[in-house]
Image: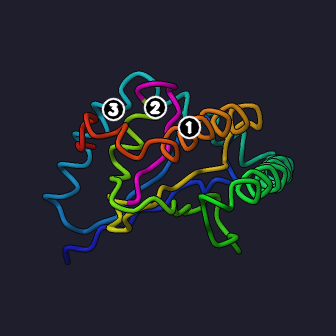
Amino acid sequence: DRCVRYSGFGVHHRRFGCFRLGWIATRDKEALHILKQHSAYNMSSIGGLKEYIAISALKHRKALIDRNMSLLRVNLITLDGWLRQNKKHLSYVYPKAGSTVLVFYHQKNISSIKFCNYLFDTTGTLITPGDVFSVPNSFRISYACDHRQLVAGLMCLSEACKKLNENPHFLDDESDEV
């Protein structure tokens, strides 16, 4: 009775950097009421536009999927090459599916939250700290983005990793809040 089911467009059905569109099904009237209020607030001005774009995307889904899968393949090759160049300080498991990679750094006792906050505050590059998944000494990188954004983000990440390897204490004054 209290089940809430969510579904939506996967990465392969949407343009990277664009909106997310999904739907919810539930018999829980209280949850439905809360979700409707939240949805109305968030989508009051663009709901129809999102639906129009979603219909257009579904009409051209093969081309959209082909484009996105091609971009994911190219980006994974780029990310894999960058990670191989940095294998002295970083390790990862090559993904079999999906559009993210969990990267482990070899410097111990360094909060991934501090590291990711530093990276975002100094460069605007956004990666997900592993500590929020209870996986310390790691961060998650999404490669479902424009290729130029990925390359620019990896350059920023290279500089931050270099600084971390030269002086593991440079993050001591950083915030440990997500």
Q: Nearer the viewer, mark 2 or mark 3?
A: 3
Residue extent of the magenta highlight: 121-130
User: Which quadrant, please, contains the N terminus?
Assistant: bottom left
Q: Amino acid at mark 2?
A: Gly
Dot 2 crowding, Cα within 10 Å, few <14, some 14–19, many 20+: few
Q: Nearer the viewer, residue 80 or 28?
A: 80
Is-magenta flag for residue 41?
no
Relative image position of residue 145 (x, y in whole percent): 67, 41
Give the residue drawn at x 23%, y 42%: 177
Question: Marks 1 and 3, how far apart in space?
Answer: 14 Å
Dot 3 crowding, Cα within 10 Å, few <14, some 14–19, many 20+: few
Instruction: Decide if residue 149 is on the left or right side of residue 129.
Output: right
Farthest residue to the top: give it. 45
Question: Marks 2 and 1, how far apart in space?
Answer: 6 Å
For residue 42, which numbered disc appears in the image?
Answer: 3
Q: Secondary structure at mark 3?
A: helix
Q: Nearer the viewer, mark 1 or mark 3?
A: 3
Judging by the rendered image, the residue that carries numbered circle 2 is: 47
Is-magenta flag for residue 126?
yes
Q: Are marks 2 and 1 in contact (CB under 8 Å)?
A: yes
Q: Secondary structure at mark 2?
A: helix
Q: Earlier in the sequence, mark 2 or mark 3?
A: 3
On the image, which quarter does residue 171 sit in? Answer: top left
Answer above or below: position of 2 versus 170. below
Q: Amino acid at mark 3?
A: Asn
Q: What kind of colouring is applied to the model shown?
A: rainbow
Farthest residue to the bottom: give it. 1
Q: Nearer the viewer, residue 166 or 29?
A: 166
Q: Earlier in the sequence, mark 1 or mark 3?
A: 3
